[in-house]
Image (tube, rainbow, N blue to C red):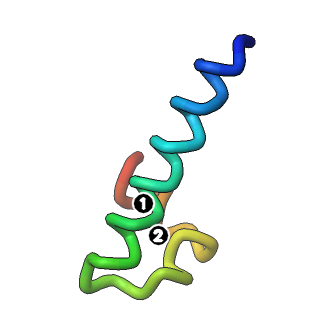
Amino acid sequence: MTANNLREQISQLVAQYANEALSPKPFVCRYKRCASFREG
């Protein structure tokens, strides 16, 4: 994996977490199976 790939993945993760934080759902929801429910 190149450094560019890693940087891209990290920024994607950051954007994902930012979206979660800005959404009405609680941020902690990710760690309580809500993520799998929503994405599954």
Closest to the observer, 33 or 26? 26
Residue 32: % across, % down: 60, 76
Q: How many marks?
A: 2
* Type of amino acid at the residue the image marks with label 2: Cys
Residue 15: x, y in percent? Answer: 40, 54
Q: Secondary structure at mark 2?
A: helix
Q: Quadrant of the N terminus?
A: top right
How many C-alpha atoms fall within 10 Å of the one at disc 2: few (<14), some, or many (≥20)?
some
- Dots 1, 2 in contact, CB < 8 A: yes
Q: Mark on residue 34?
A: 2
Secondary element type, mark 1:
helix
Comparing 2 with 13, the one in front is 2
Alpha carbons under labels 1 and 2: distance apart = 5 Å
16 and 29: which is toward the camera = 16
Q: Residue furthest top?
A: 1
- Classify residue 36 as left or right of residue 6: left
Q: What's under tag 1, amino acid-wise?
A: Phe
- Please report the residue visible at 40 percent of the width from the left and 66 percent of the height from the top: 18
Residue most extreme to the right: 1
Give me the disc on residue 9. none
Classify mark 1: residues with Cα within 10 Å, few (<14), some (14-19) or many (20+).
few
Q: Which residue is mark 1?
A: 37
Q: Position of residue 10 (x, y in %)?
A: 59, 42
- Percent from the top left, x then y, of residue 28? 55, 83
Seen at 42% across and 87% down, the residue is: 26
Taking 11 as reference, is 5 above or below it?
Answer: above
Q: In the current view of this chain or complex, which residue is farthest to the left?
A: 24
Left or right, residue 28 beside residue 1: left
Residue 4: name its quadrant.
top right
